[in-house]
Image (cartoon, grey):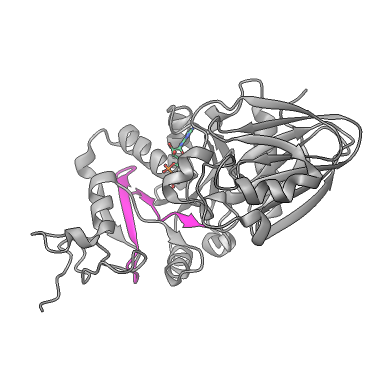
Amino acid sequence: MEQLKCIGCGAALQPEDETKPGFIPASGMNKEDAICKRCYRLKHYNEVMDLDVDSGDFMAMLNALYETDGLIVKVLDVFDFNGSIIPSFNRIVGDKKVLAVINKIDLLPKSVNRNRVVHRAKHMLSEAGIKAVDTVVISARKNEGIDMLVRKMSEMADGQDVYVVGTTNVGKSTLINKLIENTTGDKEVITTSKFPGTTLDLIDIPLGPDSFIFDTPGVVVKSQMAHYVHKDSLKFITPVKEIKSKGFQLNAGQTLFISNLARVDFTEGERNSFNVYASDKVNIHRTKLENADEFYEKHYNGLLAPPEIDRPYLSEDYSEFEFSADSDSDLSISGLAFVSIGAGAKIRVRVPKGVDVVLRPTIFKG
Ligand code: GDP
């Protein structure tokens, strides 16, 4: 039988492997003018496909970016700073300038001081060895700070191209669509191209007479909850509006489950208040520490869902962290929740293996 080719990119069409070029759902195979899923998304949604950090394509992207001149715009999710870091990021940067963009600021309560947020982002970037020349705080969804971002991008790029990079779910597509609206007003001028020497797609948006903004593939990293949750279920853990806290007065010997993806054991200390900031669709349950294992086994895909998950990660394949809060602190569970905790508590936190958890001085109080 004749091999069918995608009319967009020319790849041989195949319905078997979504991560390989030419993938098309089996139902679309025999349609006239069939195009692969990747080209379909580029054409209809201005969206480049995400890449797994372990894939060869990811290495190809790193190498191609390294060879390129231009400004790097690194998008960070205020709700998931740790999961926003692309591994080997410094390989991309070389001696290029980096502009850090803190997205989704609309999620934090208005009372949170923005300087503290910027300070935390800078601290985290410098821990990862990344030097950002400047930092802009935005909400791509609410169109906040986009003008300022475009201005800084033009200034810093100084006629060179701009590459927007980020891990999956940080809001890169939402931002790219805002940039298209704000910089061109005319969608017809948007074109797509490929990283030189790779099959990886880019979307280019004119920035000035000779320079472009390029959207690069998002990177899926294991430190993000997004890696453990079905794509359709992500909407349950990703907050969409200002996060409100849910408060719990706990005694040592109690456990909080934050959906089926995290468990916080209060192991030692005086009675303390735990305030959980998470999507309002996330279920939070309190139980006795001594019953917590059994509770999870019984309820991980019932009471504690959504999201749906493949396996009971917290009983099979997990990481554990221990912290002692010397001052009022926030526990940050990548992409799932902040938990603010009063001074004096000792806690143990369990998450799917690979997910990051850190304890930092609080941004929610004082
Ligand atoms: P990408 O994977 O980085 O391209 O991320 P998307 O643009 O698909 O966004 C991931 C999720 O975050 C979606 O549910 C978006 O609606 C949401 N999102 C993106 N930008 C913002 C923002 O500025 N504020 C809020 N609250 N949500 C956002």
Above or below, 9 relative to 231: below
> Taking the image as drawn, is residue 35 in sight?
no
Q: Quadrant of ligand 1?
A: top left
Q: Quadrant of residue 324?
A: top right
Task: Please give left or right for residue 342 compared with residue 308 in the image.
Answer: right
Q: Quadrant of residue 259?
A: top right
Q: Residue 178: x, y in percent?
A: 37, 35
Q: Residue at left 32%, top 38%?
A: 180
Residue 286 falls within the magenta-colored stretch: no
Above or below, 247 relative to 292: above
Please tell me which residue lies in front, 273 or 326.
Answer: 273
Residue extending furthest bottom? 1
Task: Please give left or right for residue 26 compared with residue 168 in the image.
Answer: left
Residue 198 falls within the magenta-colored stretch: yes
Task: Please give left or right for residue 98 compared with residue 186 in the image.
Answer: right
Q: Residue 204: x, y in percent?
A: 31, 50
Please tell me which residue lies in front, 301 or 50.
Answer: 301
> Taking the image as drawn, is residue 245 in sight?
yes
Q: Residue at left 48%, top 46%?
A: 169
Segment colored magenta:
196-220
Above or below, 88 relative to 44: below
